[in-house]
Image (cartoon, rainbow, N blue to C red):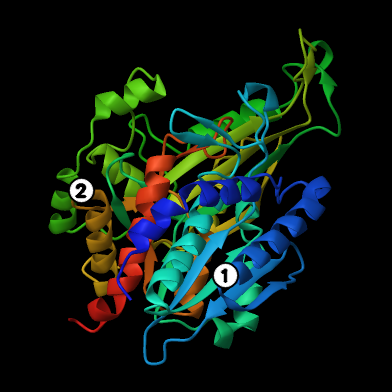
Amino acid sequence: MNRTFTAYLASHREQHLEELKQFLRFPSVSTQPEHAQDVRACAEYLAQAMREVGLDSVAVMDTPGHPVVYGERLAAPGKPTVLIYGHYDVQPVDPLELWQTPPFEPTLRDGRLYARGSSDDKGQVFMHLKALEALLATEGELPVNVKLLIEGEEEIGSRHLEGFVERHLDLLQADVIVISDTTMLAPDQPSVCYGLRGLAALQIDVRGAKGDLHSGLYGGAVQNPIQALVHILDSMHDDSGRITVDGFYDGVQPLTEEERQSIAALPFDDAQLAAELEVPTLHGEPGYTTLERLWVRPTLEFNGIYGGYQGAGTKTVIPNEAHAKVTCRLVPDQDPERVFAAIEAHVRRHTPPGVTASVQRFDAGRAYVTPFDHPAIQQAARAYEKAYGKPAAFTRMGGSIGVVDTFARRIGAPIVMMGFASSDENFHAPNEFFRLENLEKGLETLCWYWLGLEDALRGK
């Protein structure tokens, strides 16, 4: 057969768009119990879509939480096997009043498809299905063997996926793993992401008296938990932004000069980013560029702080407790367990008298890097260039994808992150959208990738 997948995609554009809209209408919010049935219904819809594409052994597979959807097509003996990962769950939509159109009623405006999940990650999952459909329709068979694992708990930390992977290791074995849940450097700049930062998430709890106290009757006689917490948090950075927790930087691998030069050559403008974010200036660890800080340096960020009275006006109390949410983005070769231990020791050393402080550990994962000269990575760059007509950039991403650490440890295949979203597309925020141009070019990119992957892996 002639390779006419581009014509197939063009002729089915409107049909595919309507199918994507249907996928986006499911309010598959994994963190909210009231949407549990919607998550299940979305999984069932996705499974049927896989069957219609032509995948085999399609199943909605239960976990202790939300289900995993699996499908495969292993009809290319002797060819490489690829595991494609994505997720069909989405973030909550709050604050609802900031959405211009209903979050689960997909709406087209100015070449953009607005809906929760359009960019993260339903739109990108959908692209994989339609790329496989196009190749089956025009080539007769896929040029590689594929396995799809699409989970329903990524937005709540993939809390049951590691156990699922361990139970199904034989089923999930592959030569390459492909994930489309990352961003491009710019809306029209194709980018191959070859590294992610890891994660260590925690909460600091400070407690004082047995209950809230009248600030007039007790003020000046007892330690205030909010003040104590602020003292602890302030001790974690110096004025320049460098982290002052002893042992935090242990294991951090310095950038090679080659990689620093590669990052420096990428088109990036500090002033433009500051203007987009509406901040007076950017700020970060001295001695590194903004992209280096975003991608290859570790961070310790305060995500939320609360305690005491939060209502209108005033309430003259000394609260009996205060809390802070903290996440650390980690880089190779930081160990999340050592980071947790270092922070716990720091909190103990810097807790003022009169209160007690404790640390709760939450999500954790190591950073991941695939050498960007790996054949599977280089093939991704070639596929992007064919579809977009310009060379792909090699980037890292400052965020974390928990399953990447799981796949790296349990399966061991190289992981290629081929994202088609842009960081300005409001994922996790109101008015999330996906650019139709990247939807169309992304479909073409994926087709080129599958068609050339075997030769790339064999060094042809």
Please tell me in which quadrant of the rendered image residue 48 appears.
bottom right
169 and 290: which one is in front?
169
- Relative to 47, does residue 19 appear above or below in the rendering? above
Residue at the bottom extreme of this rendering = 78
Which is more N-terminal, label 2 or label 1? 1
Disc 1 residue type (three-letter) = Leu
Residue at image point 83% right, 25% down: 212
Disc 2 residue type (three-letter) = Ile
Q: Position of residue 157 (x, y in %)?
A: 61, 56
The disc placed on residue 149 is 1
Q: Position of residue 414 (x, y in %)?
A: 36, 74
Left or right of 454, for residue 158: right
Quote the CA–CA distance across marks 1 and 2. 32 Å
Residue at image point 24% right, 73% down: 375
In the picture of the structure, the residue carrying the numbered disc 2 is: 263
Left or right of 21, for residue 268: left
